[in-house]
Amino acid sequence: MRTSISRAFTELAQRDPDAPAVDDVPRGEVEARANALARRFRDAGVRTDDIVTITGANTVDTVVATVAAWKAGATPQPLSPRLPGADRRAVLGLVRPALVVADDPVDGHPWMPLTSAGTTPSPADAEPLAEDLAAASWKAPTSSGSTGTPKVVVAAASAHVDPDGRVAAFVPRHARQLVAGPLHHAAPFVYAMRGLMTGHSLVLMPRFDAGTWLDFVARAHVTWGMVVPTMMSRIAALGPSRLDATDTTALDSVLHIGAVCPPHVKREWIRWLGPERVVEVYSGTESNGLTTIRGDEWLRHEGSVGRPTGGTVVRILRADGSEAPVGEVGRIEMTRPGPATYRYLGVDAPPADAWHSLGDSGWLDDDGYLYIADRQDDLIVSGGVNMWPAAVESALERHPAVRSCLVVGQPDPNLGQRVHAVVDVGDADVTAAEFDAWAATALDLETRPRSWTIVHEPLRDDTGKARRSAWR
């Protein structure tokens, strides 16, 4: 039965106050702290349907502040503490939050320290608020911002939930969930918070590290978690002996989302965990549609991101707007019949039944499985030949020294664009000449990089996002 998110947390805490909620902090304590903080929010002027911006790392305080926003009737807006100053000012200027909860004050906006979430409340303040409050929108995260200033995506769904329901059909009903991605990013936020309000216990990683992720899985008896392909690549790079030595008996399944996973990485995860425990979802912050695929399906449709589910319809469009036939690459669009599931703050909501694209190109096979070619904006046209960076990156990342790479098109007076590769080699010592020789054995002549930049630091953040424009 659906109830307000506020009451859902209260009900779960009353059922079992000693059950672990976040990092083994009991549900009763999270409930008490969130109730007290919600009162402080209301005293600070927060009203129903206001936005409360929460800028915090993966900590119990960040979670408590988010729950408090729901209890105060507000819409929480998770925001990255590492967002560049200009982007942060632009987002906050658009949002005009009733309150910013962060480590440090933000000029021009009402502020409360995040440490307020850690205060031990008095018995009276620990009680639930008398009024059952619920915002018209349950979340307002930002888009990834990998191609510019992030947009604020306001969910159409209200702050209500069935505490006895499932997060999604592909997520276990009960789970000890490992949160490896930053809570200020849309996907980790959704799965962690929806899990918490339906009975999951959360285990927070302060920041992703491949070896630490394996340790958490084994020692914290993790049963489910979400990862992105960047994380999967780093974990797989630890090698079969390290993977196979990790106790994964408690692990029900792993969900990966956020980008296309390189086939060689996906094969290694399927080998390691078994195909039934590796699940993939293709979707976006806007939640306009999704596809899903399990590892055993993927082995029959290698490279696919799955078939539409949850009422989703997928189509592939040519440049002229006509629908492409099976097997032809075009613009991917998705819809779910009914009212829009989101709107961008400051922009009218899309009409009902509207089609939406995440900016990707791809194709469908005869069985209705979707394949991603690449981001439309990332297409490289070199000497009249179209090339998708993802395919080249997947090949280059098989080099033993490459931790990650980005392939971009750079201006060329003869070719229009040349293929340029940026490779992160960590502590390795590899030259461009060595990469040239290796690429000659792994790539066709037309797709080989003609120039290289070698770096020794990660190219993508913990959500797998990178700003390609900086390398073009």
Image (cartoon, grey):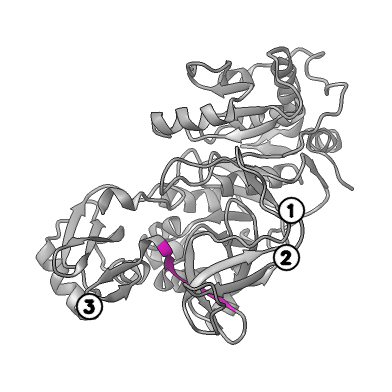
Which amino acid type corresponds to the residue marked 3 in the rendered image?
A: Glu
Q: CA distance from mark 3 to mark 1?
A: 50 Å
Looking at the rendered image, the disc whose residue lies closer to the viewer, 1 or 2, is: 2
- Measured as percent of width and height from the top left, residue 230 is found at 42, 57
* In the image, residue 374 lies in the stretch drawn in magenta: yes
Above or below 427: residue 259 = below
Position of 373 relative to 185 (above/below): below
- Percent position (x, y) of residue 377? 39, 60
Q: Nearer the viewer, mark 2 or mark 3?
A: 3
* Residue at screen point 26% across, 76% down: 384
Front-lying residue, 455 or 390 = 390
Magenta span main SS: strand
Q: Residue furthest bottom?
A: 366
Secondary structure beneath label 3: helix
- Point out which mark residue 310 bears: 2
Q: CA distance from mark 2 to mark 3?
A: 40 Å
Residue 446: give its label. Answer: 3
Task: Judge the density around disc 3: few (<14), some (14-19), many (≥20) Cα neighbours within 10 Å.
Answer: some
Question: Cβ–Cβ below 8 Å for labels 1 and 2?
Answer: no
Residue 259 appears left or right of 49 = left
Q: Looking at the figure, which quarter contains the C terminus?
A: bottom left
Give me the C-alpha separation between circle 1 and circle 2. Answer: 21 Å
Q: Tell which circle, 1 or 2, labels the residue nearer the N-terminal end.
A: 1
Identify which amino acid the numbered label 2 is placed on: Gly
Magenta span includes 275: no
Q: Which mark is residue 106?
A: none
Q: Nearer the viewer, residue 194 or 54?
A: 54
Tell whether label 1 touches label 3 (CB within 8 Å): no
